[in-house]
Image (tube, grey):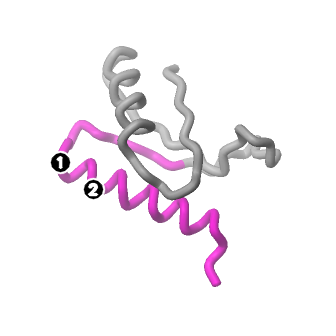
């Protein structure tokens, strides 16, 4: 079968593509987390949502973690 982490990445990718169809300003990239160590708060992938400013980034990040279901995977975000 397909490894679970690849399923999660594909679900995340499809969700982001679906959002982009509705909101063309939703620019995203999915990176493999090179610092993954398997801890409780470690993530296999990092979703980068590009925004014009920190307020917009915060709004989109907050919306994403509260509204998007990617299975049992926990979602965390920070604004940089």
Q: Secondary structure at mark 1?
A: helix
Local packing at callout 2 (Cα closer than 10 Å; few below 14, some 14-19, many 20+) is few
* Residue at image point 48% right, 64% down: 10
Q: As displayed, is residue 65 above or below residue 70?
A: above
Residue 25 is a magenta residue? yes
Residue 78, given in percent of the width and then of the height, sits at 53, 25
Q: On the rendered structure, is 34 left or right of 45? A: right
User: Looking at the rendered structure, which numbered label has been put on residue 18?
Assistant: 2
Q: Which quarter of the image is occupied by the N terminus?
A: bottom right
Name which quarter of the figure residue 54 lies in: top left
Is 15 located above or below residue 59 in the figure?
A: below
Residue 21 screen position, x and y as percent: 20, 53
Residue 65's spot in the image, x, y percent? Answer: 44, 37
Q: Residue at x 82, y 45 (%)?
A: 37
| Residue at the bottom extreme of this rendering | 1
The residue range painted magenta reads: 1-30
Q: Is residue 2 magenta?
A: yes
* Residues at circles 2 and 1 in contact by the CB criterion of under 8 Å: yes
Please give left or right for residue 2 compared with residue 65 in the image. right
Which residue is at the front of the view, 63 or 16? Answer: 63
Residue 22, numbered circle: 1
């Amino acid at each position: 079968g397909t490894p679970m982490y690849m399923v999660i990445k594909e679900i995340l990718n499809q969700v982001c593509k679906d959002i982009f169809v509705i909101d063309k300003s939703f620019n995203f990239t999915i990176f493999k987390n090179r610092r993954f160590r398997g801890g409780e708060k470690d993530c296999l992938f990092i979703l980068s949502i590009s925004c014009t400013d920190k307020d917009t980034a915060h709004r989109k990040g907050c919306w994403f973690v509260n509204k998007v279901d990617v299975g049992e995977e926990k979602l965390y975000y920070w604004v940089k």
